[in-house]
Image (cartoon, rainbow, N blue to C red):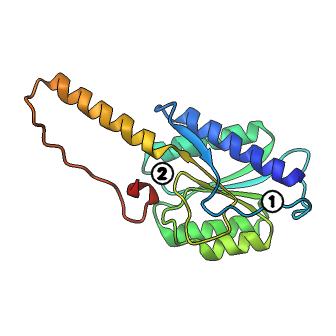
Amino acid sequence: MKFRKFASAAAGLFLAASLAACSGGGAGSTTGSTEPKPATSGSNSAAAPAEGGSVGVSMPTQTSERWIQDGDAVKKQLEEAGFTVDLQFANDDIPTQGQQVDQMITQGVKVLIIAAIDGTALAPQLQAAADKDITVISYDRLIRDSENVDFYVSFDNFKVGVAQAESLVEGLEKSGKEKPWNVELFAGSLDDNNAHF
């Protein structure tokens, strides 16, 4: 039970830090994974050490300021709360992210926070984490095809889309260009679950 509180606190700290790092404000939400595992009393006997515990944070890349800010903010917040943090960036390389997560598991982290490059590529790592009772938090990009995700922390992608559309319309109206406006939509990478919203 204590460990679940530890994991919930880590998820809450992570969300707070990531929201503080983003300038969009107001569009954040926390939701359970699409197939949450039932929490049972005594199912995880590991308790968080008094100083916190070890958290592995896996971010997709350092080529985007967004991921750098998220990673740095999360690390800072978790360290201030007494956790030891292993923050790694995978340079948008799926095998590298898998190896980094494997290394975090081997080093004995108690919680993994993962912003996956490919939401379907980490099943072996997530199984290894589950086998060692490591709590997994999927951040922003939902990790699919695995029942071994304990929490999903993300933004309300529908509200993000509404805000983007409102900003687009406002900008077009200010441009003074006559209607109808031609707008071309881009949804993002096919392996990013958020692109399908």
Could you classify mark 2 by the number of other residues whose Cα lies within 10 Å: few (under 14), some (14-19), or many (20 or more)? some
Could you classify mark 1 by the number of other residues whose Cα lies within 10 Å: few (under 14), some (14-19), or many (20 or more)? few
Q: Is residue 104 visible?
A: yes
Task: State which mark lies toward you, 2 or 1.
Answer: 1
Left-right relation of 143 to 180: right
Helix, strand or loop for disc 1:
loop
Task: Name the image quarter holding residue 192.
Answer: bottom left
- Say which residue appears at 76% left-offset and 47% top-offset: 8
Left-right relation of 46 to 24: right
Give the spatial CA distance, label 2 vs label 1.
35 Å
Left-right relation of 108 to 12: right
Q: Tell me whether the residue at label 2 lies in contact with that at label 1, contact meaning CB atoms closer than 8 angstroms.
A: no
In this orientation, which residue lies closer to the viewer: 162 or 121?
A: 162
Q: What label sits on residue 146 in the rendered view?
A: none
Q: Name the residue under label 1.
A: 39
Residue 92: horizontal and vertical position, in percent?
A: 45, 62
In this orientation, which residue lies closer to the viewer: 12 or 178?
A: 178
Left-right relation of 9 to 99: right
Task: Name the image quarter holding residue 173.
Answer: top left
Q: Which of marks 1 and 2 precedes in the sequence?
A: 1
Q: Mark 2 points at which residue?
A: 62
Residue 45: horizontal and vertical position, in percent?
A: 92, 62
Report the number of numbered marks.
2
Question: Where is 126 relative to 175, above or below?
Answer: below
Residue type at numbered disc 2: Gln
Helix, strand or loop for disc 2:
loop
Residue type at numbered disc 1: Ala
Residue 51: horizontal and vertical position, in percent?
A: 87, 44
- Say which residue appears at 82% left-offset and 48% top-offset: 6
- Say which residue appears at 24% left-offset and 31% top-offset: 169
